[in-house]
Image: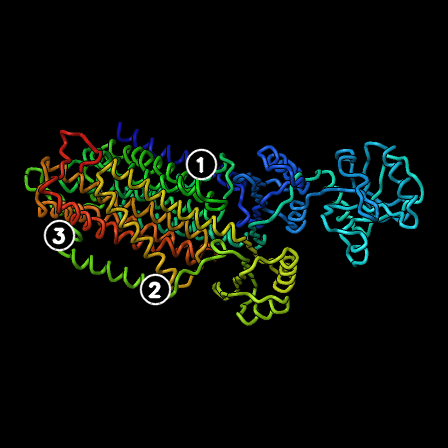
Amino acid sequence: MKTRGRIAAFFFIVLLFASLIGATVTDISKKINLGLDLQGGFEILYEVEPVDKEQEVTRQLLEATVQTLNDRVNRLGISETVIDIEGEDRIRVQLAGVKDQEEAREMLSTSALLTFRDVNDNVLLDGSDVVEGSAKQDFHPETNQPIVTLKLKDANKFGEVTEKIADMSPENLLVIWMDFEEGDSFYEEVEKPEPKFISAPAVHEPLYTNEVMITGNFTIDEAKYLADIINSGSLPVHMHELYSTSVGAQFGENALNKTVFSGIIGLVLVIIYMTIVYRFPGMIASINLVIYTYLILLVFELLNGVLTLPGIAALILGIGMAVDANVLQFERIKEELRTGKSVKNAFKSGNQNSLRTIIDANATTILVAIVLFYFGTSSVKGFATMLMVSIIISFLTSVYGTRLLLGLWVNSGFLNNRKSWFGVKPSQIHDLADDEELEPTFFGKTPDIIKHQKKIFLVSLVVAAIGALSLTIFKINPGVDFTSGSRVEIVSDEPVSTEMIEEDFASLNLEPKSIVISGENKEMAVSRFDSVLSEAKLNEVRQYFKEKYNHEPNISIVSPIVGEELVKNAVYAVSISFIGLIIYVTFRFELFFSFTSIVALLFDVFFALVVFSMTRLEFDLTIIAALLTIIGYSINNTIVVFDRIRENIRLKNKLIKSKKELAGIINRSLLQTIIRNINTTTTTLIVVFAFMVLGAESIFGFAVAIVVGLIAGFYSSLFLASQLWLVWRGKLLKKKPIDFRKKQRVEGPQV
């Protein structure tokens, strides 16, 4: 009866989640806010400078500016807006789903300082004289042309002003300016085809009224835009653009579709792999992977997060963490089954022995994600947020979810005589009556990895030498994020060539520093400029390529100041990650473990940089996120190996004084963890390869960095780190034997 009850409970839980997911996942997906890279839009980082030069930039001034900007954005009908204060004098604006980017950019950046002046540029009235919110688009009663009407606070004051202007005949013009700047002149502007002032109506007699008409050669949209600007109020600061990036709506939609599709394919392939390798537990893990994905979307929607391409990458990479926890559990259960234990006892022991390792592995990756969040900006910060959420939820679903679902079957007794359902063959099961210790194997063999120590060091040194030579000769190809200048990404429905794009820019009197053609059918071109293009020139570029290729180009601009800060923040992020990992690993293991793990991490990052140097792939801000993710994954693998080494030393329950004995323990630990590392790396590579082959072009470099890092991390964690630890720690064994004896119950530094 208990057997049926527990199995029935399993199916009830699965059906409950299936019904819940089926009924709500579509609605949840639609409610998630998409970043500008997934639906088009732009992001701008402004440096603010007070209009009054004697005024200082204070927090109050910045908050007042943000409030005015929010009001302007609301008038555009944009709901998914992020406007943040950064540092002491900067404001970052992110607008996703903008239909008219140029209108939005202009509305944001204009200070909207409305002034009424005479022809000699003397101020007669300003925005403070206008009734708040009174401006509106209307039509001239005689010509029916679009105009803007507004109300003044004091009709008598306006009468006095118009009386003064009327007396100035024949120069009786009331010149209406928006954002008059020092050096501007009516007499200079009036000669231009498109003067900076809005209009200059003639005043023939005093007008004692509080209603004013602003006439000009307006369209209805232009008149409405001017009314909105006036109603939003003037900014107390001037906005200087330091950084900007814009993404066309169609490009964002294509990127979203490709990324989601590649993610689904990757998830399906991981489920198939887990089921083949781990049989019945693999099916349980697959169920939890689906629940994990659903919970990620639910939590992110509840947090009102903004999902970006790197965020989706973090979500899918979180699958690797979830799978890793399951692999650790299943491998430990299989080990216990091979020793001859019952299914129930193996399940209990396997879960207990794997939990500490899983906690250590997840904690180190969380540490990296926190550093990323603190030092990252925009999409990198979103990536870090999603990575932290992914790790927490993957821990809950893969540890407790799998333990619950698999435990129902185990405790029902149904699996008592079905050890083959765990992927353990009868011939692999050891007799409990036999006191001989069961030796770990690798595909039926027990290779001595330690004896290849010199070869491992030689290979590592050769790779390091070749890499150093490559970095010296080719260097890194930095993206616009880390230098300064402009980046224009052109998308076409047909294949393009370098010559075509060069001719296009030549017609605009521009010469890019480099042009890189990419895409499956060579339908994309990325052009780099050393200089920051002016806003007028950028408008020209947008209009030209949109008309010619039917796609709005994606443009990024970075000033030298921002480029320098990004480099500085990247160095800080990596350095602090290393320091944090050293402290954590020392606390959980010992000091020598932390030293060797950092060497392994440096090797992984170095190897990834070498690949980017050789391939000339553009090194941008998302690659820093990828490198820090590599650090998290690599330390994850290294800690699994070190944890097993520590466990095997404790099982000896004595001081380790002999290097030969220590080498035997390390070799045993490597054989016990190598299958786990292979399966974890493979499942993550499956997902990342899906991104590379089927995903959006904009995260190709990110995927390449992850692939390279995973391969390097597999090598360094299993071979390089353990061998270095053996050499360094082995030299001190006589003076300082290793003491991880059980009776001490100490997990801190033992040096």
**Residue identified by numbered label 2:** 470
Percent position of residue 381, x then y: 46, 43
Q: Earlier in the sequence, mark 3 or mark 2?
A: 3
Q: Secondary structure at mark 1?
A: helix
Percent position of residue 422, x then y: 23, 43
Between disc 3 and disc 2, the foreground one is: 2
Q: Earlier in the sequence, mark 2 or mark 1?
A: 1
Q: Quadrant of the N terminus?
A: top left
**Residue identified by numbered label 1:** 19
**Residue identified by numbered label 3:** 446
* Amino acid found under the numbered disc labelled 3: Thr
Residue in the foreground of this view, choosing between 3 and 113: 113
Percent position of residue 50, x then y: 64, 40
Rounded to the nearest angstrom, the CA distance separating label 1 from label 3 is 48 Å
Rounded to the nearest angstrom, the CA distance separating label 2 from label 1 is 55 Å
Image vertical order of residue 57 relative to residue 696, above or below: above
Give the quadrant of residue 651. Answer: top left
Q: Do the CB atoms of the residues marked 2 and 1 lie less than 8 Å apart?
A: no
Q: Is residue 85 left or right of residue 751?
A: right
Point out which mark residue 678 bears: none
Give the quadrant of residue 373. Answer: top left
Q: Residues within 10 Å of mark 1 (few under 14, many from 20)?
A: few
Q: How is the image coloured?
A: rainbow
Q: Residues within 10 Å of mark 2 (few under 14, many from 20)?
A: some
Between disc 1 and disc 3, the foreground one is: 3
